[in-house]
Amino acid sequence: MMEFQTATTPDVKKIFELYDEAIEFQKTVFHKHWLAFDQELVAREIAEVRLWKIIDDTETACIFSVAYEDPIIWGEKSGDKAMYIHRIVTASSFHGRGYVRSITDWAKAHAKERGLRFVRMDTWGDNPKLIEYYQQCGFTFVGIVSPEESATLPKHYSGISLSLFEIDLARATA
C-alpha cells in the first residue's frame, strides 16, 4: 500500500542516498544533472513540513518537496495561490511505478485543501523526455524562463533555462 508522509529528521540519511542515486541516474540519461544538495536546505524543508516521502511496501520509494511560493523561478506569478513541486526522486528499485502521476493527484487534492488554484513544477528547458512526461501527467506547458543567480537555489540552476508547467485547478477535470 502506498502512503504519503512528511519526511522527518531520521529520514535525512535516506533522503541523501536517494539524491545521490538520482544524480548518478541523471548522468546516464541526460547531459545535465543535479549537484549535491545542501543539508540546511533539507533540514529547513523538513522543519517547514515541505519535504514528503512516499512509503510503498514499507520502504521509502520516492521523495519530493513542495513550496507555496517560488519567486525566483516564477517571478510575478509566484503571487498566485499555488503550490510548487520540486526534486521528485524515485528509488531505482521503484522506477516505473508511476509516482509522478500519484504525486500529481496528491498535489491537486493538497492544493485544493489549502485553497490554492495552481499546482506547478519546472524541469530543464531542453529535456524533451521529461517535458512530454509531465504533460502526460496532466501539466500544461506555460513557458520557459532562465532564473537569475540566487543563493537560495541549488547550484545546478545556474545558467540554465527551465520549462514551466502548471495545472489550473479551476479548469482541471479530475
Image (cartoon, rainbow, N blue to C red):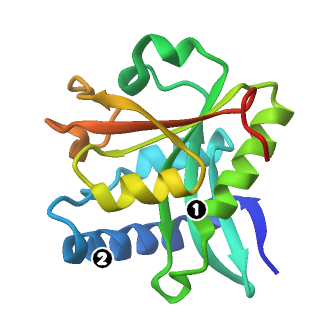
Q: Hey, which quadrant is residue 52 in on the image?
A: bottom right
- Along the horizontal axis of the image, is 115 left or right of 83? right
Relative to 163, residue 69 above or below? above
- Along the horizontal axis of the image, is 162 left or right of 54? left
Query: From mark 2 to mark 1, how far is it between C-alphas?
Result: 17 Å
Q: Which mark is residue 67?
A: none
Relative to 76, residue 28 above or below? below
Residue tagged by mark 2? Answer: 25
Within-10-Å neighbours for mark 1: few <14, some 14–19, many 20+: some
Relative to 157, residue 134 above or below? below
Question: As shown in the figure, which amino acid type bears the numbered disc 2?
Answer: Phe
Q: Which mark is residue 100?
A: 1
Which residue is painted at 40% across and 16% down in the image? 75
Question: As shown in the figure, which amino acid type bears the numbered disc 1?
Answer: Val
Which residue is painted at 43% across and 75% down in the image? 17
Of badges 2 and 1, nearer the viewer stands 1
Q: Hey, which quadrant is residue 8 in on the image?
A: bottom right
Within-10-Å neighbours for mark 2: few <14, some 14–19, many 20+: few
Residue 122 rendering spot, x and y as whole percentages: 41, 41
Q: Hey, which quadrant is residue 161 in on the image?
A: top left
Residue 7 visible in the current orientation:
no
Residue 34 rendering spot, x and y as whole percentages: 27, 57
Q: Quadrant of the N terminus?
A: bottom right
- Of helix, strand and loop, which one carries label 1? helix
Which residue is painted at 26% across and 76% down in the image? 24
